[in-house]
Image (cartoon, rainbow, N blue to C red):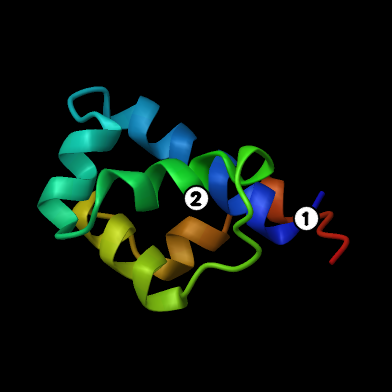
Amino acid sequence: MKLLTAIGIRLKNLIAEKGDITEYELAKRAGMPRSTVWKIINPDMTRVKTVKLDTIYQLIDTLGVTLGEFFDDPIFDNITD
């Protein structure tokens, strides 16, 4: 799995785990366009090839998750790129 795909899946899973926030609300609280969140979660449907670490940080900090907690997930065990 590509890193960008894993990041999108992990972010989508965190939003679902929280259960009280939508992609739109996350983007609004993090101070970025909703399209940014959508592009991260759906990289195969866009031309996005990278995501900045500070963007990831803003989003997960808004969800109350640290970078360590975010990347400490089995989804990142088999990154191929």
Residue furthest right as drawn = 80
Gap in Å between the C-alphas at discs 2 and 1?
12 Å
Counting from the top left corner in percent of width and height, residue 38 is at 42, 41
Mark 2 belongs to which amino acid? Answer: Ile
Q: Residue at coordinates 52% horizontally, 67% vertically from top-left?
A: 51
Please tell me which of labels 2 and 1 falls first in the chain: 1
Q: Is residue 6 left or right of residue 23?
A: right
Mark 1 Cα-neighbour bin, 10 Å: few <14, some 14–19, many ≥20: few
Mark 1 belongs to which amino acid? Answer: Lys
One can see residue 17 in this view? yes
- Vertical placement of 61 versus 44: above or below? below
Q: Is residue 61 left or right of residue 39?
A: left
- Vertical placement of 30 versus 12: above or below? below
- Vertical placement of 28 versus 54: above or below? above
Q: Nearer the viewer, residue 3 or 74?
A: 3
Counting from the top left corner in percent of width and height, residue 73 is at 60, 50
Where on the picture, by quarter, is residue 44? top right
Q: Secondary structure at mark 1?
A: loop
Counting from the top left corner in percent of width and height, residue 24 is at 22, 35
Q: Nearer the viewer, residue 79 or 39?
A: 39
Q: Which mark is residue 2?
A: 1
Q: Residue at coordinates 36% horizontally, 68% vertically from top-left?
A: 55
One can see residue 10 in this view? no
For disc 2, the marked residue is 40
Q: Secondary structure at mark 2?
A: helix
